[in-house]
Amino acid sequence: MPKTVATTLRTAVAGVSGYAGAELARLLLCHPRLVLTPPMFLGRMDGPGADGGSVALTSLHPQLSGLANADNLSVSPFDWDQLQREGIELLFLATPHEQAREWAPIALAHGIKVVDLSAAWRLQEADNRAIYKLTDSDPAAAATLQAEAVYGSPELHGPAIANARLVANPGCYATSIILALAPLLRANLADLDCGIICDSKSGVSGAGKTPSPGTHFMYAADNLSAYAVFGHRHTGEMLEQLHLTTEQIQFTPHLLPIPRGILSTIYVRLNEVGSIKKIQDCFDEFYISSPMVRVRRSPMLPQIQHVVRNNFCDIGFQLSPDGKRLVVISCLDNLLKGAASQAVQNMNLMAGWHESEGLL
Amino acid sequence: MPKTVATTLRTAVAGVSGYAGAELARLLLCHPRLVLTPPMFLGRMDGPGADGGSVALTSLHPQLSGLANADNLSVSPFDWDQLQREGIELLFLATPHEQAREWAPIALAHGIKVVDLSAAWRLQEADNRAIYKLTDSDPAAAATLQAEAVYGSPELHGPAIANARLVANPGCYATSIILALAPLLRANLADLDCGIICDSKSGVSGAGKTPSPGTHFMYAADNLSAYAVFGHRHTGEMLEQLHLTTEQIQFTPHLLPIPRGILSTIYVRLNEVGSIKKIQDCFDEFYISSPMVRVRRSPMLPQIQHVVRNNFCDIGFQLSPDGKRLVVISCLDNLLKGAASQAVQNMNLMAGWHESEGLL
Amino acid sequence: MPKTVATTLRTAVAGVSGYAGAELARLLLCHPRLVLTPPMFLGRMDGPGADGGSVALTSLHPQLSGLANADNLSVSPFDWDQLQREGIELLFLATPHEQAREWAPIALAHGIKVVDLSAAWRLQEADNRAIYKLTDSDPAAAATLQAEAVYGSPELHGPAIANARLVANPGCYATSIILALAPLLRANLADLDCGIICDSKSGVSGAGKTPSPGTHFMYAADNLSAYAVFGHRHTGEMLEQLHLTTEQIQFTPHLLPIPRGILSTIYVRLNEVGSIKKIQDCFDEFYISSPMVRVRRSPMLPQIQHVVRNNFCDIGFQLSPDGKRLVVISCLDNLLKGAASQAVQNMNLMAGWHESEGLL
Amino acid sequence: MPKTVATTLRTAVAGVSGYAGAELARLLLCHPRLVLTPPMFLGRMDGPGADGGSVALTSLHPQLSGLANADNLSVSPFDWDQLQREGIELLFLATPHEQAREWAPIALAHGIKVVDLSAAWRLQEADNRAIYKLTDSDPAAAATLQAEAVYGSPELHGPAIANARLVANPGCYATSIILALAPLLRANLADLDCGIICDSKSGVSGAGKTPSPGTHFMYAADNLSAYAVFGHRHTGEMLEQLHLTTEQIQFTPHLLPIPRGILSTIYVRLNEVGSIKKIQDCFDEFYISSPMVRVRRSPMLPQIQHVVRNNFCDIGFQLSPDGKRLVVISCLDNLLKGAASQAVQNMNLMAGWHESEGLL
């Protein structure tokens, strides 16, 4: 499929004030293809009361000062006309779900492609999407667009992403679990009768920037707590992407007393007695062309400090002595491979660039 | 001064929902003199919209469950009549400053003594108090009561506290600095011309329980930041208790990425060349009868982990090779010796008990 | 069973220098029955090269200074004759496993009862014990003594502990998992065919005081890592105490970036569709007379900050919407209910006192 | 001074196993000028028993896997002949001080320039250097070479560094303090009679990778402690670079419970009443051409999270209301601007490239 590859791309980011937004800004500012066309930064809302009007980028994120031309950029109020005047080709939505549900169609109508970091367009099944309480002003059009939206997991849907107009960037927990399980399930190695157990632990940045009792330092520090047991909203992504039923996978997230990073410990029973070599080959082959996934040699296991502040997802495993049970561990930085760097990876594919550009 | 010593005391705590309130509840529940008369727990506000009505104590503070009779106690709406019916003799105010300023006179009018953990009554000078923006409905009465209020530092004002009706429990930073400097200043060892530098570092609990950008885990964790440089409101307590001018003492607080604990590093120039023995004696003699202050042998220095979750203030020092400069370090747990356990120490004195009862 | 209850007990602690030893020292120093007979503190080794000779207790543990008569106590070289001269009745062994395996018979031969905090005497099956590589100079005598040793879980074996001469204090992970599962297994509620998954997370103090790459701050901080997958040595305790096979329970420990606390997330399939009430009753009834276990009301779940620095084990659960799967969460402080306070609880039972004395 | 600028440089790193070594490896691997000539990585010792022989780089530092050609590189035993065969032009020494003292002359004799990250060559005064207990086999030659060595602070000695053969990369604490004070002292703004107080706080990585009681997680976590009061070995660098006497500057380091980052709080009395503008101008002008120093607008102050994992030193200040006292705060990442990235900055200057290449 020959495709003319653009040398650069005109991008904009709506919602740069959060943690993922800051990382996205950093990655785009330093992206080798965007040196001459830095992204536009925009508020999370348009209309009266819009946020983000004319604030210097580095007043929101002082740590970015001095990088590329960060000091010359400001965050502007959101304005569709201005996006068109500037010739924006790709819009990143790091906005609340509702906003992203509303804006994606508008962007497409303006001829602007979208990478949406919210959950607004990730789920094809209305039942799975219900937890987000999204409403559509034009349900029929939304349904059509939903069917067109591509789940932005480059390792699973690379070619579709390359041709997509609307990419739904995956959830952080979902990424860590889907990437760990997809190879095993595609190879039909798992016994699903007992169900797969996914015990995940995430740093606090996953809870967002809004101060709340649960993100207070005194709550999170020196603590560990489970939450949303049997009801976390990322579960729907796992069901859809892995083609599983709720009986076949069980997901329990925990809040870790660290700023960033996710580790998922995943318990899989095998269909038949397995060997380390067979499992290793299964992962290796699946990810042979995936630069952003690092498959570790068993018995080496990923740990959070190997992925904090980089753009990889690490996957490793150990097999029980009787060869029947597998513990798979995957790690990623929830703000990067779990959000911003996966969004950049999607942008790279959509632009026809190598998926790892600006990420290694 | 012979004094009839009560075997117990009827106490109440207003404002038990915060961090210091939780520690105060724990200390009072386990206090050997209060086994048969557990404290009443009350909301922080009276009247319509009052908080704390009929909540189980352990639903606010699950960690207290199982201790003494914690599981049988509830937090009641504040009600002066009920306090009188229950024969309350001592009221702890762990309320906002404004509330404590208003309520202390009312409590005294009801014949109830007060230990106020807020800053409402700590400062004699109106200029120093101005930072709290307190207002008095009856300024003359407030002035009289202010003059009567005793600064609740048992090591400095033990006898006055024993006879006081209103004790103003000191600030956490102020305690750490005042206890470190009082012996040196009383002995006239410090050269005040160059000014004393107090560089303090505190855990996040000192910032209170209300979620805010500055108490968000993502702000505080893996970070250190100075704040309120040249303008922290505890400075007034240091000026008044140590009889210093603003030129003579400079205080810089920092926010540490830990839940609790304060360490103050204090730089003092000496009037004349000193010896380790002379300085050590100065501290030892000052605190010879103070069970809640631990003077360390130079060169041993306090560190925060020695005081976290206990009721002591630790003080240590090192002298420069030329004998002219002193580094004094003091540590305490800001919620305990910096708040709740100092309040209990004051209660002990007011009741005629040994000041360390229930604290060792 | 009438039993003459001693008013006090002469105790000694061998191996007070570690983390559990420090907590044991604190608990014994402040124990109301031991006010007049503080424990003797002894080194971890006897003979030439013995450690711990004549060191002040508070030089090892400065945080204990000021508590009870901690400042007057020293750590003496280990000497059996001195133990007899002092009339020691109960010896706590906080020593390496090998030492405890060797010393327990000697202590009993001297008429001294033993609470052993190591793993030396916990396991009845030689296969389970093999991981500790223990050797016995008199294997037959050791086997007899092993059969006599009581696993020191007061909630499971209270009466046997009360009459025991040798109590093997349980492992920290094992305690958190055994207490969470014992009620369900005794009531025959679990479907064991799919296996029970125990995903545990522990603070760093569980790894001991010896500096190593794995306890370096830079390794543990901001990190999470799984270890000893399919091979942790506490597994044997779970197998024996819960009467399970290795196929029926799977245990994965993780190292948390916090000083202390364990949280175990336990996944159980039920034999038949369950109800919240039935499960809640199961736990409530099992622990109705157990003051050191707090059963939480579903859906409330334990979290580490509720148990840090106290002596409880907290247990809670949630049931899946289809009523077939259970997530049980248990928390404890690994140095307290997971070590030192459980040892004191055992001492209380052996002395005929209430099991919670000195612990609430 | 026209200078032919090389397009690339053949580099080697001795001692890549430590924390600074890992960061140096990462920076060099990703350096745009070194894409085609990745650095050689070598052990810290030569001769029998040499470390580092034939280990894969990513087995030492798994987090580097996937970056540039990290996975194809190994760490070789140190061998001068091989360095010559490979045409190495610049050798980074991330070795112990003694090794660096011995090796720098050998490297120069082989025609290889040196950037030494140890303290071996930083200090011109033998008295200041004594604390490191260095010995020289040829004292006269060492003295000559010492006089030639350039202190590698690019902001102070850029032109000298560009022409140097031996650059002594500064200490982390020293960098944070020297950069904060140099502008004020050059402008003669400080009153030195009362002495400048430097209260510094550093993350644990500054203490190195060797496990020890002081780097144990249980010692450092939830703690803060002062150390090396009146005797830290970085003091000599401050004295020499700032031309001060020990009476004029006092430095107290503290160990922060975080992995990385230094914050120095510096107390300066002014010669005469100052203005914010005058101080701001002083810093701005001094650093106008220094891309790796970010001067903040007063009253904004640096904090550690602004510099963690980036290559900047941030400097800010606040002036007392009476205009006589200044609090200057500087922050940097001790492993980057305090070590590895400053070394790369020096390499850039020595190679004739822009000093910020590969660092922004």
Image: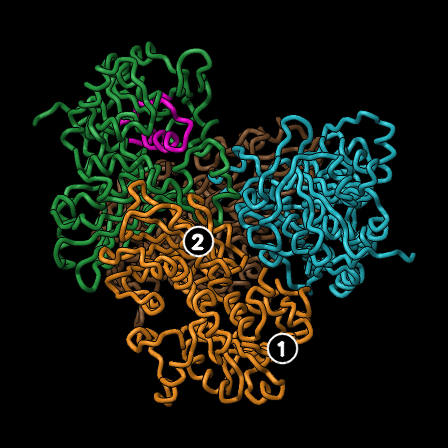
Chain colours: A orange, B brown, C green, D cyan
Q: Secondary structure at mark 2?
A: strand
Q: Quadrant of the C terminus of chain A?
A: bottom right
How crowded pointer 2 is (Cα within 10 Å; few <14, some 14-19, many 20+) is rated as: many
The magenta segment is C13-41
Residue denoted by label 1: A6
In the rendered image, the residue lying farthest to the right is D1
Q: Look at the picture and state if C259 lies above or below C100.
A: below
Asked if residue B89 shows in the view, the reply is no
Give yes or no for residue C32 being in the magenta stretch: yes
Where does the image place residue C343, in percent across and percent down from the top left?
Answer: 28, 31
Q: Chain of mark 2?
A: A
How many numbered marks does the figure carry? 2
Q: Chain of mark 1?
A: A
Residue denoted by label 2: A315
Q: Secondary structure at mark 1?
A: loop
Give yes or no for residue C83 being in the magenta stretch: no
In the rendered image, the residue lying farthest to the front is A1
Where does the image place residue D78, in percent across and percent down from the top left?
Answer: 69, 35
How crowded pointer 1 is (Cα within 10 Å; few <14, some 14-19, many 20+) is rated as: few
- Quadrant hosting residue C166: top left
Q: Look at the picture and state if A223 lies above or below A311.
A: above
Kindly report which numbered mark, 1 or 2, lies closer to the viewer in this rendering.
1
